[in-house]
């Protein structure tokens, strides 16, 4: 295989999201054989089972893009000790209709940044519960709760602190290994 296709969610809709900044850093530090496609969440209507027989174009596009992915990466903030509503809505769309769960057996990893000391620990725990129900094959270690310091990241995604860069590089290398292991046992395509 020449490269693994990774879809990634940025859980924040904010134009100044620190998790979007983190996503740029992760992509820049990732192994060369990972290729990334953002899975947009801001244009999705609220999920309702009423749509299960006729998905709107935005939701169908999300499912189609996920179908072309080998793995998924979640980069999310914490809102009220859980995941942002827009991210949960996207997961609901992608995991439905019943029997057409886009996350079934998909390799997945979770990471997030916060301006607080505990990073996004509680949001990640909440997200892991949702992904477990969706039968995603989660990377459980290393865990990564990023205490975001703006001076460490450039707008283009460069990480200026070598310890932080090394940690994020190692996280992405472990993710790549996780993807390969899961797909060896459970090929997607």
Image (cartoon, helix red, strand yellow):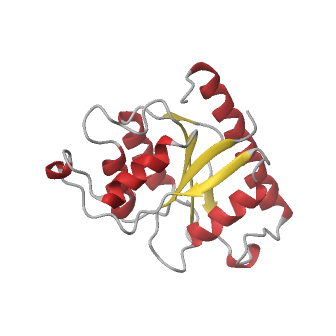
Residue placed farthest to the right in the image? Answer: 162
Q: Is residue 13 above or below residue 169?
A: below
Of 34 and 152, nearer the camera is: 34
Can you give x and y, in whole percent of width and height, for residue 103 in the image? Answer: 43, 38
Q: Residue at x 55, y 54 (%)?
A: 8
**How far across and how far down the image is residue 47, in percent?**
24, 56
Asked which quadrant contains residue 33, the reply is top right
- Image quarter where the N terminus lies is top right
Spot the residue most to the left: 50
Q: Residue furthest top?
A: 185
Quadrant for the C terminus, please: top right
Q: Is residue 166 left or right of residue 143?
A: right
Q: Who's the residue at 42% across and 40% down the image?
A: 131
Q: Is residue 75 visible?
A: no
Name the residue rendered at 82%, 67% in the picture: 161
Occupied quadrant, residue 132:
top left
Residue 37 versus residue 110: which sits nearer the camera?
A: 37
Please tell me which residue is depicted at 51% across the width and 79% down the height of the picture. 15
- Residue 140 falls left or right of residue 124: right
| 7 sits to left or right of 165 | left
Question: In this picture, is 59 found above or below 31?
Answer: below
Return the x and y of residue 29 as percentages of the image width and height.
77, 56
Whether residue 146 can be seen here: yes
Compared to 75, does 174 lie above or below? above
Residue 159 position in % (x across, y down):
78, 68
The number of numbered badges drawn on the structure is 0
């Amino acid at each position: 295989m020449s490269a693994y296709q990774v879809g990634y969610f940025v859980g924040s809709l904010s134009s100044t999201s620190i998790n979007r900044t983190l996503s740029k850093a992760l992509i820049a530090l990732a192994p060369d054989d990972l290729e990334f496609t953002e899975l947009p969440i801001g244009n999705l209507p609220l999920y309702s089972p009423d749509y299960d027989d006729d998905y709107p174009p935005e939701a169908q596009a999300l499912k189609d893009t996920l179908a072309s992915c080998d793995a998924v990466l979640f980069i999310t903030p914490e809102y009220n000790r859980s995941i942002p509503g827009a991210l949960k809505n996207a997961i609901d769309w992608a995991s439905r209709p019943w029997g057409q769960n886009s996350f079934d057996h998909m390799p997945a990893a979770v990471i997030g940044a916060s301006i607080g000391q505990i990073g996004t620990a509680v949001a990640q725990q909440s997200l892991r519960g949702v992904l477990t129900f969706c039968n995603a094959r989660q990377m459980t270690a290393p865990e990564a709760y990023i205490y975001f310091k703006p001076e460490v990241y450039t707008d283009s995604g460069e990480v200026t602190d070598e310890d932080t860069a090394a940690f994020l590089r190692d996280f992405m290398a472990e993710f790549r290994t996780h993807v390969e292991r899961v797909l060896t046992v459970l090929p997607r395509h």
